[in-house]
Amino acid sequence: MTLRIAMWSGPRNLSTAMMRSFGNRPDTSAVDEPLYAAYLDTTGIDHPGAAEVIASQSPDPATVLRELTTGVVPTAVQYQKHMTHHVLPSTPREPLALLTHAFLIRDPERVLVSYAKVRSEPTLEDLGLPQQVELYERFGGPVVDAADVLRDPRATLTALCAALGLEFDDAMLSWPPGPREEDGVWAKHWYAGVEASTGFATESPGTRDPLPERLRPLLERCLPYYDRLAPYALRP
């Protein structure tokens, strides 16, 4: 039986690097943000390359979830990179019970600093934090903090794999640079950093950009959601 891992993350949470990490395992195939087209088609929100994204995937979430939960997978493990803000009120929840869930969280201040470089006025809805908490409370699953992944990738990924019933593989620690076949058509707008990477980069606190003051009220709204999940993060 295929292990179908749904990794739920907000944007700018190290999610694409984590997809690279799992996708570099010889037993794993990756799926990149399969609900993105449905999200854009339903909301009409203006994202870079929105029309191209909608044309590249089914915009029907029920169709997408049927494929993710029952479709043929060529590998023993399927890693599904999901953005929590793509889960709208109209997105069916029941099929998700067939997946094995995991959650990737990150300090909201670091998320906002990074995301504001792409969209200058992010909203709570852009970040998907309420949906991440909802999904955790409904389905459970291991939680990992991006800061722990960056601090000690081997130990954190070993703990995550154990929680998912997998053996850790050294291939998860590094990968060749460049694009991947599984990358969505939106990669050219968002993936420049990860395409240049060959592994998890360390983050130096001394070089961090400050949070713009205009985003501090949004940070205060984000923190309770992060604080809800942070105590459950695996500690290597």
Image: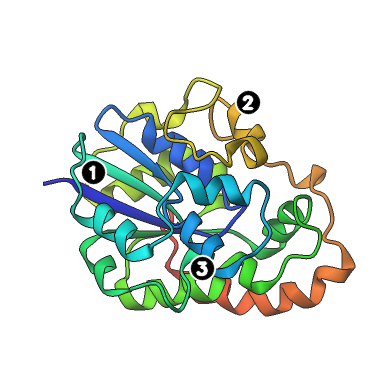
Q: Is residue 59 above or below residue 150?
A: below
Q: Which mark is residue 230?
A: 3
**Is tag 3's residue or tag 2's residue first in the polypeptide sequence?**
2
Residue 170 on image: x %, y %: 36, 28
Its colouring scheme is rainbow
Q: Residues within 10 Å of mark 3 (few under 14, many from 20)?
A: some
Circle 1: residue type: Leu
Residue drawn at x 35%, y 50% is 160
Residue at the top extreme of this rendering: 176
Q: Earlier in the sequence, mark 2 or mark 1?
A: 1
Which residue occupies the extreme left position in the image? 1
Quickly name the residue at label 2.
196
Q: Tell me the tag on residue 191.
A: none
Mark 3 and mark 1 in contact (Cβ < 8 Å)? no
N-terminal label among 1 and 3:
1
Please name the residue shown 83% across and 50% down the image. Answer: 209
Q: Position of residue 66 (x, y in %)?
A: 25, 59
Determine whether, in the image, residue 208 is placed left or right of residue 225.
right
Give the residue drawn at x 73%, y 65%: 122
Whole-percent x, y for residue 27 in the image: 24, 32
The residue labelled by disc 1 is 166
The answer to whether the residues at label 2 and label 1 have Cβ atoms under 8 Å apart is no
> Considering only vertical position in the picture, is 113 above or below 24?
below
Q: What is the distance, in whole Å, between disc 1 and disc 3 at their CAs?
A: 23 Å
Mark 2 element type: helix
In this orientation, which residue lies closer to the viewer: 78 or 230? Answer: 78
